[in-house]
Image: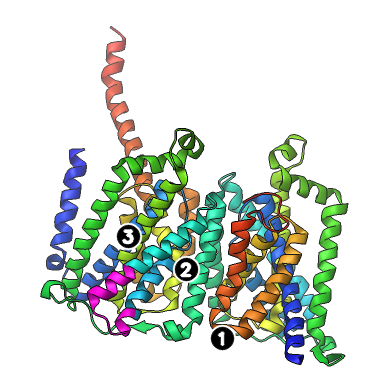
Amino acid sequence: MSGRVFALGVAFVALVTLPYWMTGVYYINVASQILFYAIFALALNVLVGYAGLVSLGHAGLFGVTAYATGYMLQLGFGHPMAILVALVISLISVAIYAVLSLRSTGIGFIMITLALGEILWGLAYRWISLTGGDNGLSLKTRPEPFGYSLSDATAFYYATLVIFLLSLAAVTVFVRSPLGAALMGTRDQARRMSALGYHVWAIRFYACLFSGLLTAVSAILFVYYTQFISPQTLGLTSSAEVLLMVISGGAGTLLGPIFGAGLVVIVKTVVSGFIERWNFLLGAIFVAIVILMPEGLVPGTARLWRLARRKRARSSKAIPGSAEAKP
Amino acid sequence: MTFWLVLTANSITFGGLLFLLSAGFSLIFGLMRIPNLTHGSLFMLGAYIGATFVIGMLGVKMNFWLAAVLATLTVAFLGALAERMLLRRLPGDQLAQVLVTLGLSFMAADFCLLVWGGDPLSVATPPELAGFARLGVLVFPNYRLAIIVIAVIVAIGLWLLLDRTRLGAMIRAGVDDPDMARVVGVRVSQLFTIVFALGAGLAAFAGIIGGPILSVYPGLDQDMLPLALVVVILGGSGSLLGSFVGSIIVGFIYNFGQALLPELAYFVLFFPMLLVLLLRPQGLFGRHVP
């Protein structure tokens, strides 16, 4: 356990000092991307990992927040007002999203969320008077919380880091709370939870709201980072990318989605630097992980590591054991 | 008046095309209990492979119908291969199977972009169906009429296959109760391969038949998959009649939505699906809730 605490401490120090040892605007921007995608992956993981509900429309919700922020700014509102309204709109849309999709679980849930995501994509793509269609919406400025300008890459990185750490803390508290335990109960034994008197639907609904709120937070960071939003962000590919982050890292773990986000963003950035076949690679990684390491890279590696250690422990124990065996 | 008539005729044509696409989707969904997210890609692959032969990109220029048959067989084989090599490794794990089909659909889309490039290919209408037919006030392309006829023929063929043959009886048994079908000696896992190949072939056939109307372009897969999804949710999974009625309904909604409310076309398309999900989750003709 202390090894784990030590590793987390090292990771924390590394993140805080990152702009000092990893100089260059490009790398700092990649780090910011990893962090806000990690929030997005953590949000989706609340549903995929802890509730057992695979949503394939989360990029749609992400897009609603981003468009709402951009649209409010275009109407001439200030940043705090735009963010506040975007959060409220996101919560309303995720509530509708949840009411519609929680009619079903398992494959039914996947299909409904896929359809809802496609609706949102279609609206963004076609409702040109509101969204600008394929041209998207541009944001002119980044906000200045407490008079601290975020237009510089390092400043934006630190703002993202703070929000990332707060989100991680929120997810940790949520998962370890009685509500989180009940949510995992509904994932594993929904009928038994219902018989025990839990309101399974309500628990799943709260999980959706929580996931939607975190998604909105990451979307606001995203839209301020790129200062641009287009329908492509809402597409099935984007939903699948986040799902890949969750699944590759390890669904139902706290750190897995963060590693997954790092993996996907780095592979995507590095690979698309010299070849254009990112989607092919995305699909291939997807298939390979689902078939070869279905529990995800972090738990999968942990399992192999434990296995190797136990083997070593057994072989070192076996020598004195065999000596005692023949007195 | 003519506007409405043309719109109606186009809707029926598009419905016929959708039926070819979604009949296989519905069968796969009914039997294997997974929405096959590669279905749009299979449609697109069929369209691209068919177009390659029709245009004569490999140096062999071919008759449209021969190209259609070749594309259908190729994609049916690919479908069977994917089922045998990948989906078979995840027995009973439907979530993992869906994710594998999702991954495959990305690979297929990128593969098509790599091989055929980003420019749309237009497929010429087969010369024997190039003219127009006069139906009262309506002048309508022969080819579109032919699509309706083909869809009806395929529907009857599938109905005969499912309702009158031993294989059909086994598939129906598998759809209704896979465990019980296994107990009485039906090799359900073999049916999976057959149905997957059949569905893939039908999707590819729809792709090449739709080529002259829709043309073939990157992103065709993502345009068609949601439509198949809506058809099956509306009609109910595993039901042939359901996919037929669902296809016609979606054909109408899609065409009228595009013409009358272009900005909200997608919303109009998905709204009836949501209504069905809320009021009748098993679909209009479905037997079980997904």
Q: Secondary structure at mark 1?
A: loop
- In this view of the protein, can residue B22 be seen by the observer? yes
- Locate residue B257, reporting x and y percent: 62, 79
- Which tag is nearer the camera, tag 3 or tag 2? 3
In magenta, the rendered stretch is A72-87
* Amino acid at circle 2: Thr
Say which quarter of the image contains residue B260: bottom right
Q: Nearer the viewer, residue A98 or A33?
A: A98
**Gap in angstroms between the C-alphas marked 1 and 2:** 21 Å
* Amino acid at circle 3: Leu
Query: Which numbered disc covers residue A237?
Result: 2
The reply to whether callout 1 and callout 2 are in contact (CB within 8 Å) is no
Do circles 3 and 2 both sit on a common chain?
Answer: yes
Q: Find disc 3 in the rendering and name its residue.
A: A214
- Locate residue B273, reporting x and y percent: 61, 64
Query: Which numbered disc covers residue A315?
Result: none
Identify the residue at image location x=82%, y=48%: B169
